[in-house]
Image (spheres, rainbow, N blue to C red):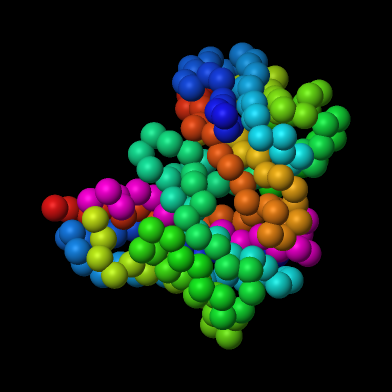
Amino acid sequence: GNSVTQMEGPVTLSEEAFLTINCTYTATGYPSLFWYVQYPGEGLQLLLKATKADDKGSNKGFEATYRKETTSFHLEKGSVQVSDSAVYFCALSDPGAGNMLTFGGGTRLMVKP
Amino acid sequence: NAGVTQTPKFRVLKTGQSMTLLCAQDMNHEYMYWYRQDPGMGLRLIHYSVGEGTTAKGEVPDGYNVSRLKKQNFLLGLESAAPSQTSVYFCASSYSGRAGWNEQFFGPGTRLTVL
């Protein structure tokens, strides 16, 4: 079956530090990959996505590249802000599984001023 | 345009009680989903619907029932609540299930505690 593995948090950084959150996946088909963000007390919002190998998704300074050879989709940002503090979820949708989303466990990011 | 809304926001039940969570979307989406979120486990799909009048089981359907009588509404029912159902419940919707059209939009969540 499909699965998504994320690094465990919390990740604590100082403002303007470089961020990497690792995500690897297993899938039976050829999935699309997503990063969702959940701010405190809110639902999830789509942050970025990539639908095929070597695609780079980007939004709000965040980037992630779909790496088929390493089955990875790591999230990066060059300079984090306090407002980036949230929980980040990696997810995949597999056409072979009806395009339902499979989520990783989430990584909490805390950015200190 | 309210997006996805959920009612109620919070609820406390005693073991054995029943309740219904309501999800509504105003984006004319075909697909709707119910998830539960537990610490360290991400979101797990309970049930979903690919259109009005249709429902299907997800990863963790036991103890829950759903109905989609109207396209814009998706109800999640707990017939006899158990402490293991203490969780945060999220509803989501998407235009379709096809790749490229399956971005899911989430509601704000319902925090349920079963004593």
- What residue is drawn where x is 68% and y is 44%? B94
Q: Where is residue B20 in the image (x, y as percent from the top left)?
A: 65, 19
Viewer can see residue B92: yes
- What residue is drawn where x is 71% and y is 72%? A30
Would residue A22 appear left or right of B44 to someone viewing this image?
left
Instruction: Examine the image and state in which quarter residue A3 appears.
Output: bottom right
Vertically, is A106 above or below B56?
A: below
Q: Position of residue B72 (x, y in %)?
A: 72, 28
- What residue is drawn where x is 72% and y is 38%? B29
Whether B7 is among the magenta residues is no
Viewer can see residue B65: no
Furthest residue toward right:
B53
Instruction: Examine the image and state in which quarter residue A91 appears.
Output: bottom right
Instruction: Examine the image and state in which quarter residue B52 appears.
Output: top right
Q: Which of B39 and A27 is in front in this view?
A: A27
Q: Give the range drawn in magenta.
A: A82-98
The number of callouts visible is: 0
Location of the N terminus of chain B by quadrant is top right
Furthest residue toward bottom:
A69
Whether A96 is among the magenta residues is yes
Q: Position of residue A16 (x, y in %)?
A: 19, 64
Vertically, is B86 above or below B41?
A: above
Furthest residue toward left:
A113
- What residue is drawn where x is 49% and y is 46%? A45
Q: Which of A36 and A6 is in front in this view?
A: A36
